[in-house]
Image (cartoon, rainbow, N blue to C red):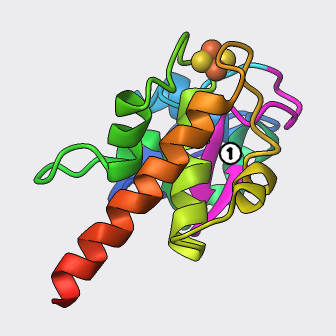
Amino acid sequence: MRVTFNANGRPVEADDVWEGESLLFMLRERLGLPGSKNACEQGECGSCTVYLDGAPVCSCLVAAGQVQDREVRTVEGLADDESGLDPVQQAFIDAGAVQCGFCTPGLLVQTHDLLEREPQPSDSDIREALSGNLCRCTGYEKIMDAVRLASARKCSDASEVSQ
Ligand code: FES
């Protein structure tokens, strides 16, 4: 079957998609978007998190055919051609929150979503939002630091704009 949808703001199509193929497989293997990582394939680790119509989902649990005519945004789509990395991506780098990096794409999408909904999250908000994203390397403290840093920068940018 052919699946046509928007990926990161651009129309795309994938041919010969088989029944049962996941969105994650289609993104990585057919559309050249390998940012979303393939780990547990059971929706447990969060490394494949992408936006589907603006809501974060585990792309390993979404059938490719379900995204027909819908909007998908992957970690690649967080960066902007003009302004470069998203502030969340830059904060993860600056806070040293990336080690092997396998969990990072999912954490970035989930953090991006959190800060869109709650620009100044409490530590408990952050823990709850990221509870479905497993990291084997960092011990999570650097990740917490990165989210706090991204939040502080976004809020300071917003106050500069409003002045
Ligand atoms: Fe390695 Fe998180 S940085 S799993």
The picture quadrant for ligand 1 comes to top right
Q: Residue 49's x, y, as percent?
A: 65, 43
Q: Residue 117's x, y, as percent?
A: 59, 74
Image point (57%, 29%), residue name:
142
Q: Residue 51's x, y, as percent?
A: 58, 57
Farthest residue, direction left: 82
Confirm whether residue 96 shows in the render.
Answer: yes
Q: Name the residue under label 1.
A: 64
Q: Residue 94's x, y, as percent?
A: 35, 31
Confirm whether residue 9 shows in the render.
Answer: no
* In the image, residue 30 above or below residue 118: above
Q: Specify whether 41 is left or right of 9.
A: right
Numbered-mark total: 1
Residue type of the residue flagged with mark 1:
Ala
Please tell me in which quadrant of the rendered image residue 154 appears: bottom left
Residue 49 lies within the magenta run: yes
Image point (15%, 89%), residue name:
163
Residue range highlighted in magenta: 40-57
- At label 1, counting other C-alpha atoms closer than 10 Å, the crowd grade (few under 14, some 14-19, many 20 or more) is many
Image point (66%, 57%), residue name:
56
- Give the quarter of the figure containing the N terminus: top right
Q: Specify whether 130 is left or right of 8.
A: right
Q: Specify whether 52 is left or right of 13.
A: right
Please tell me in which quadrant of the rendered image residue 118 appears: bottom right
Q: Which of 106 and 42 is in front in this view?
A: 106
Residue 43 lies within the magenta run: yes
* In the image, residue 11 above or below residue 144: below
Image point (43%, 49%), residue name:
149
Name the magenta segment's main secondary structure: loop
Query: Could you tell me which secondary element the residue under label 1 belongs to?
Result: helix
